Amino acid sequence: MTLKEISLFAILFIFLFGSCKDQPTNKENKLPQNNIKKDSLVPEVPPTVEEEEQEEEKAFELTEDNAIEFFFNYSKTLKENKVKLTTSLGDITIELFDNVPYHKANFIYLTKMGYFNNTYFHRVVKNFIIQGGNADNVETAEKRSKIGRYLLPPDTRKGHKHHRGVISMPSSEINNPHKLASPYEFFIVVTKPGSYHLDGGYTPFGQVIDGMDVVDDINSQPVDNGDWPSQNIYILKAEAF
């Protein structure tokens, strides 16, 4: 073998074996991997207590089996005892009776759930009552479906009479020999000095303290043969305070 051939062989040997020794393994050659997902770089904001309570309320459905227990416990948490109804004809403020806890709690609960918003005073009987809490729109039916189907027992022996300005709860229209109350509706007495023939059959649960002029105005509106106002009288908003 010539010197030239030896030199070429030596160069080839160094290139092959020396380069293999210095070459990083596949594991070493990989770039550092960031295993943190892109989405996790943005910190999650935990829901507030109010948001959690709202989610629970949305998921919760009242029934005839759980309504009494629910309102019994709910009444203990209430700080509000008044509700303001903003209607298309003016404002009506109602103060609720403390010793009628289920009906008071029910009215405030429905108010806070936004149920009464965009409902009507759907029944007007001249010189007798105005009745609210219903509407012939899909929105109201959907609200009732989400809140639940239940009735309230009468609570007529707390000393409250159907004086003018008293708010009371009508009986349900379903088969109802015990006159269980329809929780979504209410009526306000217009009669002077009152409609005392209703005592014992229906549950008074509050009194109008401001806005009886609006109640009288609603009662004076023209109606059709079924006591439904010729023009819708809206409860635009209800607020508990």
Image: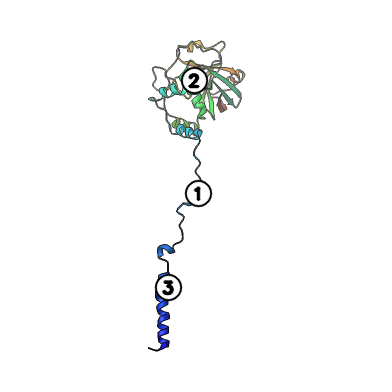
Name the element at disc 1. helix
**Residues tagged 3 and 1 counted as in contact (Cβ below 8 A):** no
Name the element at disc 2. helix
As drawn, the label of residue 19 is 3
Looking at marks 2 and 1 on the same chain, the residue that comes earlier in the sequence is marked by: 1
Question: Which residue ends up furthest to the bottom in the rendered image?
Answer: 2
Do we see residue 232 in this rendering?
A: no
Q: Residue at x 50, y 49 (%)?
A: 41
Q: Position of residue 38 (x, y in %)?
A: 49, 52
Q: Nearer the viewer, mark 2 or mark 1?
A: 1
Find the distance from the CA under tag 2 to the CA under tag 3: 88 Å
Q: Position of residue 200 (x, y in %)?
A: 45, 12
Q: Nearer the viewer, residue 92 or 78?
A: 78
As drawn, the label of residue 104 is 2
- Which amino acid type is marked by label 2? Lys
Q: Residue at x 56, y 20 (%)?
A: 94
Q: Nearer the viewer, mark 3 or mark 1?
A: 3
Q: Residue at x 51, y 28 (%)?
A: 112
- Which amino acid type is marked by label 1? Leu
Find the distance from the CA under tag 2 to the CA under tag 1: 48 Å
Q: Nearer the viewer, residue 95 or 20?
A: 20
Q: Position of residue 147 (x, y in %)?
A: 45, 30
Left or right? Give the position of 66 relative to 111: left
* Quarter of the figure with the N terminus: bottom left
Question: Which residue ends up furthest to the front in the rendered image?
Answer: 3
- Which amino acid type is marked by label 3? Ser
Q: Nearer the viewer, residue 190 or 76?
A: 76
Q: Residue at x 57, y 17 (%)?
A: 208
Residue at image mark 1? 41
Find the distance from the CA under tag 3 to the CA under tag 1: 41 Å
Do we see residue 38 in this rendering?
A: yes
